[in-house]
Structures are given as structure tokens and as C-alpha cells.
Image (cartoon, helix red, strand yellow):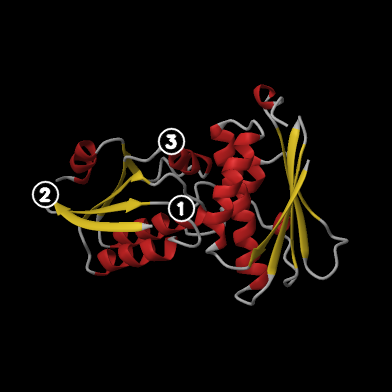
Amino acid sequence: MKILNSVQNQVQVVEVEGDLDFHSSPNLRQALNQLADKKAPKIIIQLKKVGYMDSSGIATFVEALQKTKKYQGKLVLAEMAPAVRSVFEIAKLDGIFVLSDSMSDALQKVGA
Amino acid sequence: MQQRFVLKNESSELPVFRAKMRTFLSEKGWPEKNTGEWLLVLDEALTNVIRHAYSGTPGEIIVEISDEPSKTEFMIEDHGKRFDPTQAPTPKLPKETPGGLGVHFIRQLTDRFEYDNSFQGGNRIYLMRYKPSSARSGS
């Protein structure tokens, strides 16, 4: 799995590429913890290159959401592939996270 | 038709096994969406073995697959400490704290999820799902 960090319009964009499972999710967890530790106010996680995700991936996002909420940060999950989105739907978490189909919409939702 | 795989108790086995199963399930006629769901089920079951049955100690995980025209069944066996995932509590959804969703996914996406209480020296579970009618000529 690859994780690319960039800044767009003062928003931290975390682009993830590859499968997100029990093996790879600790790397993403570490990257998101670093952003939460420095209280990054606006974070977009771009998931268009993630074709597979399991409950470890979900747990990583839930933890990131909890941490960002604590300091009133905003977190948007953008451009999920249908297979990944369906995992959120089975967990009924699609209503808890702010999801976005495009980066332009994600930037708007995060308040950029 | 039966196939047997022996995996190491390592998380690095998961993506390799998923790739093999994606091909296998597709060849057996499972539609792409259902194949993805099967991969999630298998991944969660194997992750439970790695995390709870073996808890970091070395060991083998045996996976046997039986494919029939109407259904596919997986048997997953380990020799770790006793862990019955079918007894995991049903989470109240949406669950806004991390963890506890893996077994929920297995329950939601299988027609049979059973723990073999008579198996000695480890754990054995069965996972079965009936094929959609469109997939029943793939075996």
C-alpha cells in the first residue's frame, strides 16, 4: 500500500493506493495519527485507488474520525470505489462519515 | 471439486490468498460483487485466526474449499488457542468505536457460519454461501 501526503488549498490530502487490510492498515493508521496529533484542521482521504478494504480499514477510519472530532477537525473520505463503499454500507457507517464522490466536492465539504 | 491451501499465520499471507481466491471464485462463476464479498468474509475469518487463535505465535492455517454448482463452502482450521467467532456479540450499528465489525461482515455475507465444537486441538469453522442463479453453471 502507498500513502501520499500533500496539501491542497490548506487541506491535508492523504492519497491511499492498494488494498487496505489487517496487514496494511497499521501504516495508514500511523499516517492519520500523525495528522491528528498535530491537529490538522481539514483532512481529505482520497480512496479512488483502494480496491479492497476490510474491517481493519474501517477501524482505522473510525479512529481517525474520533480523533479529529475531538479537536473539531474535519475529515472527508473521497472517491471511494463501489466495493469499498459497500463495506461502509454493510457497517451502516455511510451516514456517520462525510463521503464525497469527487475531490472538488470533498474540498467544498471540508470547507476549503 | 475440492482444493486445499496451507497458509502461514502471517498477515502478509492475506493479500496473496485474496488474489488466489479472486481468480478461483471468478472461475467458479461468482459475479464480481459477490466475489468481493467472499474475499471480505475470508479475510475477516483469517484475520480472526491470526489475531485471536494464534496471537502472534507461529502456526498454520488450513483452508479447504468445496465448490458445487449451487454453493461454495470454505473450511478454515487452525491449531491455536480456542476461539469461537460465532459467539462474538452482534454490534449495535453504526458502531462509532473501532473494532468488532469483522464477525458482523461474516454473518451478513454468508448463508452458513458455523464453529465445529467437536474439533480438538484448535479451531475449525465453516463458511458457506449459495450461488446466485446466474452463477450456477460455473462448477
**As shown in the figure, which amino acid type bears the numbered disc 3?**
Pro
- Please tell me in which quadrant of the rendered image residue A84 appears: top left
Query: Mark 1 and 3 residues: CB-CB less than 8 Å, in contact?
Result: no
Q: CA distance from mark 1 to mark 3?
A: 15 Å
**Left or right placement of residue B120 versus residue A39 in this view:** right
| Front of the two marks 1 and 3 | 3
Chain under numbered label 2: A
Circle 1 residues within 10 Å: few <14, some 14–19, many ≥20? many
Quarter holding the N terminus of chain A? Answer: bottom left
Identify residue for label 1.
A58
Q: Secondary structure at mark 3?
A: helix
A51 relative to A57, above or below: above
Residue A97 point in image, percent of width and height: 37, 46
Whether callout 2 and callout 3 share a subunit is answered: yes
Residue A50 image point, x, y percent: 39, 47
Q: Amino acid at mark 2?
A: Asn
Q: Which residue is mark 2?
A: A9
Rendered view: B133 above or below A81: above
Q: What amino acid is labelled 1 in the image?
A: Ile
Q: Residue at x 55, y 40 (%)?
A: B36
* Residue at mark 3: A82
| SS class, disc 2 | loop
Q: CA distance from mark 1 to mark 2?
A: 27 Å
